[in-house]
Amino acid sequence: MANNEINFPDKKFIVSKTDLKGRITYGNALFLSMSGYQERELIGAPHSILRHGDMPKLVFELLWKHIQDGKEIFAYVKNKTKNGDYYWVYAHVTPSFDDKGNIIGYHSVRRKPTAKALSAIKPLYSALLDAERSGGMIASQKLLDTQLSQLGKNYDEFIFTL
């Protein structure tokens, strides 16, 4: 398997939509191109098909909690392509609502992250992943809480400062 980093242009956006279970219902051309999958392979597949093994589970737990609570979230995510390459994104994930205010799915717009942001995120994610491997999600959450406390910020404030 390849394990090369691939990039996309600064001014381009990767867009996808999922249903309530996280199954892909839409992906724009850049989403398809970056993933390496054909549209027919992605539509109906779980979005986790793109999950890279270097991603801490805690980040996805935070993401799902926010959007299931009807709130938006910004997060840095390392995605895996069909052939094993990877790419980093700065994701803005929001719930989609029907006319009665019920959540009917999720929408994600991703842009290329800055090198400065990734220089902070990569060591943090590595430490969170190590904590998860040795002590599970509780250890990972404790580590993140400690890091944020030392910075005097909550998760959202930390992400916005990168």
Image (tube, rainbow, N blue to C red):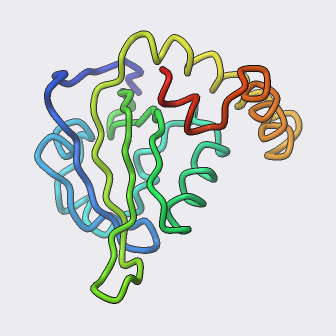
- Which residue is depicted at the point 62% across and 37% down? 155
Q: Return the x and y of residue 79 as percentages of the image width and height.
A: 41, 36
- Which residue is depicted at the point 46% across and 33% down? 76
Seen as rendered, the residue at the extreme bottom is 100
Q: Return the x and y of residue 140 as percentages of the image width and height.
A: 78, 37
Quadrant of the image containing the N terminus = top left
Find residue 58 and report its image quarter: top right
Q: Is residue 37 left or right of residue 162?
A: left
Q: Is residue 89 left or right of residue 60?
A: left
- Which residue is depicted at the point 22% across and 41% down? 14
For the residue pair 6 and 13, the one nearer the viewer reads as 13
Q: Is the residue 156 above or below the residue 66 in the image? A: above
Q: Is residue 109 left or right of residue 65?
A: left
Q: Return the x and y of residue 20 as percentages of the image width and height.
A: 43, 74
Q: Is the residue 83 above or below the residue 68 in the image? A: above
Seen as rendered, the residue at the extreme front is 152
For the residue pair 149 and 47, the one nearer the viewer reads as 149
For the residue pair 77 and 1, the one nearer the viewer reads as 77
